[in-house]
Amino acid sequence: MGPRSLAQLDPAQVLVRISLPVGFELNVPATRLELQLKASGTNKTAAMGLTAVTVSRSAHPGGLFSPDVPVLTHPLRLTPEGCRQLRELQRFILATDPKQFEFVVHVPFAIVPASAREATFWADLKLSQTEPFKPLIDGAKIRFTTE
């Protein structure tokens, strides 16, 4: 997929799926999907807001020697403002023909259990109803320190 194909997306079909360990809560209003576009001499970025669709409970495979991780999975859609921002980026794509793009997801926690020392989380992106989810963050570990 090249940057130009992003201009064909329907913003209403973009879906982000974030999975956090049970006990952690996602700060949905602060969660963002960022799209960075790089054209010759010009860059454009938008951090698009997301809104919750549902929450479901499941388990992510823990790995070869680790148990599965019970998670809460949050499918999120672009907010109306996020859809507007993506349409603006699509106009930029058509006008400048950028050569590079990058998606970044910002995953802030609303609640971290007091005893938590680390958390593993996942974030996936689906750009249309006909595509599968693609991993953006695949089992990233965050370590917490106490002061």
Image (cartoon, rainbow, N blue to C red):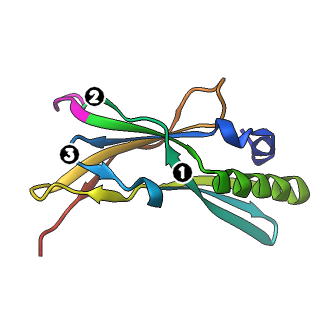
Amino acid at pointer 1: Leu
**From the viewer's perspective, is 124 left or right of 98?**
left
How many angstroms separate mark 2 from mark 1 (CA)?
26 Å
User: Magenta segment, which residues?
Assistant: 63-70
Query: Relative to the observer, which residue lies in front, 29 or 19?
Result: 29
Q: Quadrant of the N terminus?
A: top right
Q: Secondary structure at mark 3?
A: loop
- Residue 140, percent from left and from top: 34, 48
First in residue order: circle 2 vs circle 3: 3
Q: Is residue 66 magenta?
A: yes
Taking 45 as reference, is 10 above or below it? above
Amino acid at pointer 2: Pro
Q: Secondary structure at mark 1?
A: strand
Disc 2 marks which residue? 61
Disc 1 marks which residue? 50
Taking 13 as reference, is 45 above or below it? below
Identity of the residue drawn at 49% across and 37% down: 53
Taking 19 as reference, is 84 above or below it? below
Q: Of all residues shown, which one is farthest toward the bottom?
A: 147
**Label 1 neighbourhood size at 10 Å, few (<14), some (14-19), many (20+)?**
many
- Residue 130, percent from left and from top: 66, 23
